[in-house]
Image: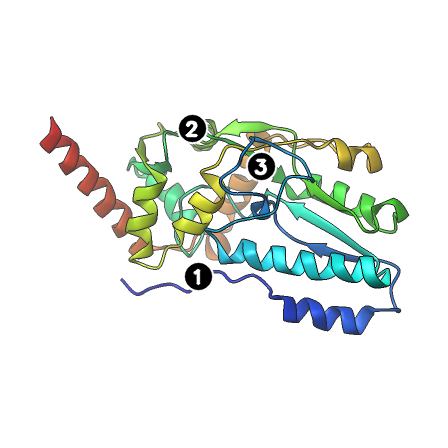
Amino acid sequence: MNPKPRPQGPGPDQVERDHRLFSGKTGQYIYISSASAYHKPSRDHIITEGTTLANPYWQYSRDKIACEEFLMKKYREEGFPVTIVRPSHTYDERHIPLGVHGSKGSWQVLKRMLDGKPVIIHGDGTSLWHLTFNTDFAIGYTGLMGNRHAIGEAFHITGDETLSWNLIYETIADALGVELKACHISSDLLAAAGDKHGYDFTGSLTGDKAVSVVFDNSKIKRLVPEMKTNVPFHRGVRIALDYILSHPGECQTADPEFDEWCDQVIGALGSVIGTVQ
């Protein structure tokens, strides 16, 4: 397998460029950061905007933190009108949110489900997670636009619905009309096995999705009272699947390398279990 490029977040140099371009010329600059910037490992599963920013596992998150720090410094020193937004796991009609997938998106995991093959769920599947449909995110985002009370502040914009990863995968399988064949594998093992083949599970799992989080959304709701979960996951996943299944050329990109990797990892785990037994 050939290594895949790992995602890189925008560095401070790009934000510095924006500051040069927009300073004195805009009434509000909204920077989209990431909820993955919150402290990992988490000291408390309840996350507020005051939770410390620190993520030693994922460069993507550290880049986001650096950008936030630069912008807030400019706000404090110059009054640069920044608003920081930290989304968590936002999805739309073209994507199914998953914990473990390849570089080409979610389709190969869906195909494994449809073919009756086991799919990998990180950990024991009981860690908690938030999913936000893009139209719900848009309500929070647009509600901050032009809002003077949002200047110099940070907000996470996430749905209210808290789901375990087991429930997320079970809901996907139900929407597909198939039985879920789950193979639970520790995040540490997935990180070790994935990093060798270019899959950055150290960042995306250990530094993000493997950690239980419950977002306190009271701050965004004070400014945008209409912010709530209008599209719960059991509805959002069906909207997405309807689109994905009806747009094969656009959304059904095969990923045979990831499929083979899954078979190898699941097979290796089965061999170890068989030896222990």
Is the residue under label 1 in contact with that under label 3 (CB below 8 Å)? no
The earlier-in-sequence mark between 2 and 1 is: 1
User: How many residues crowd around disc 2 within 10 Å: few (fewer than 14), some, or many (20 or more)?
Assistant: some
The earlier-in-sequence mark between 3 and 1 is: 1
Task: Label 1: state its secondary structure.
Answer: loop
- Note whether residue 259 is visible: no
Check disc 2 and report the residue beneath it: 166
- Amino acid type of the residue tagged 1 in the rendering: Arg
Q: Quadrant of the N terminus?
A: bottom left
Task: Measure the alpha-carbon separation of dots 3 and 2.
Answer: 14 Å
The earlier-in-sequence mark between 3 and 2 is: 3
User: How many residues crowd around disc 1 within 10 Å: few (fewer than 14), some, or many (20 or more)?
Assistant: some
Image check: 230 left or right of 54?
right
Task: Label 2: state its secondary structure.
Answer: helix
Rendering coords of residue 52 (x, y %): 62, 43
Q: Residue at x 84, y 37 (%)?
A: 223
- Amino acid type of the residue tagged 2 in the rendering: Asn
Check disc 1 and report the residue beneath it: 6
Check disc 3 and report the residue beneath it: 131
Task: Label 3: state its secondary structure.
Answer: strand
Image check: 4 left or right of 82?
left
Q: Residue at x 55, y 45 (%)?
A: 243
